Amino acid sequence: MSQKLSEIEKTSKFTWGKPIELHKIGPYTLLEYYPWRTSGPSVARVIDYSSTAFHGWFDDEDTNQSWPSLEAGIAGLIGEKWGGRNNGGVGYYFCKMIDAPPYDKVEVAK
């Protein structure tokens, strides 16, 4: 379900959880939010304050995607811009390629 940024800014209501803060960088907007608590395929209408997620818009159009970190969200939005809507998860693979959290982080021995 797509949501307009103006609607969220006006009402502070967001389909995927409780809004915290908007982060705008050029054509990219990420909404940091507390997600709804989930249990399997069902969603409880209880906010999970133990984690945050980032939902994205590109040129004010909802991508209908969320990411577990601000960095992953930026990579995902860049993938949307250059790879299009069905880009095969290029943001995920970029984060994985550079070993950026939270994707399969490998600790390097010192």
Image: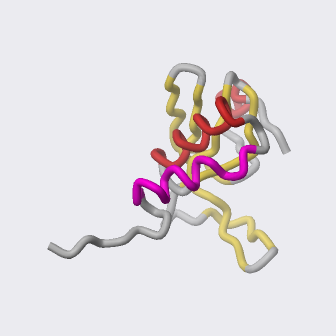
> Which quadrant is home to the C terminus?
bottom left
Q: Residue 54 appears at what percent x and percent y?
A: 57, 47
Q: Residue 18 appears at what percent x and percent y?
A: 62, 50
When asked about the image quadrant of residue 41, the answer is bottom right
Q: Is residue 46 above or below residue 72?
A: below
Q: Residue 43 appears at what percent x and percent y?
A: 77, 69
Q: Is 3 inside the magenta-drawn segment? A: no
Residue at the image point whose x is 58% and y is 54% from the top: 92
Residue at the image point whose x is 70% and y is 24% from the top: 60
Q: Residue 31 appears at what percent x and percent y?
A: 58, 40
Q: Is residue 104 above or below residue 39?
A: above
Residue at the image point whose x is 51% and y is 38% from the top: 21
Front in this rendered view, residue 54 or 12: 54
> Which quadrant is home to the N terminus?
top right
Q: Residue at the bottom extreme? A: 40
Q: Residue at the front extreme? A: 97
When asked about the image quadrant of residue 35, the answer is bottom right
Front in this rendered view, residue 42 or 109: 109
Q: Is 98 inside the magenta-drawn segment? A: yes
Left or right of 99, for residue 32? right
Q: Which residues are magenta?
A: 87-100
The colour scheme used to paint the residues is: secondary structure
Q: Residue at the right extreme? A: 1
Residue at the image point whose x is 41% and y is 68% from the top: 105
When asked about the image quadrant of residue 73, the answer is top right
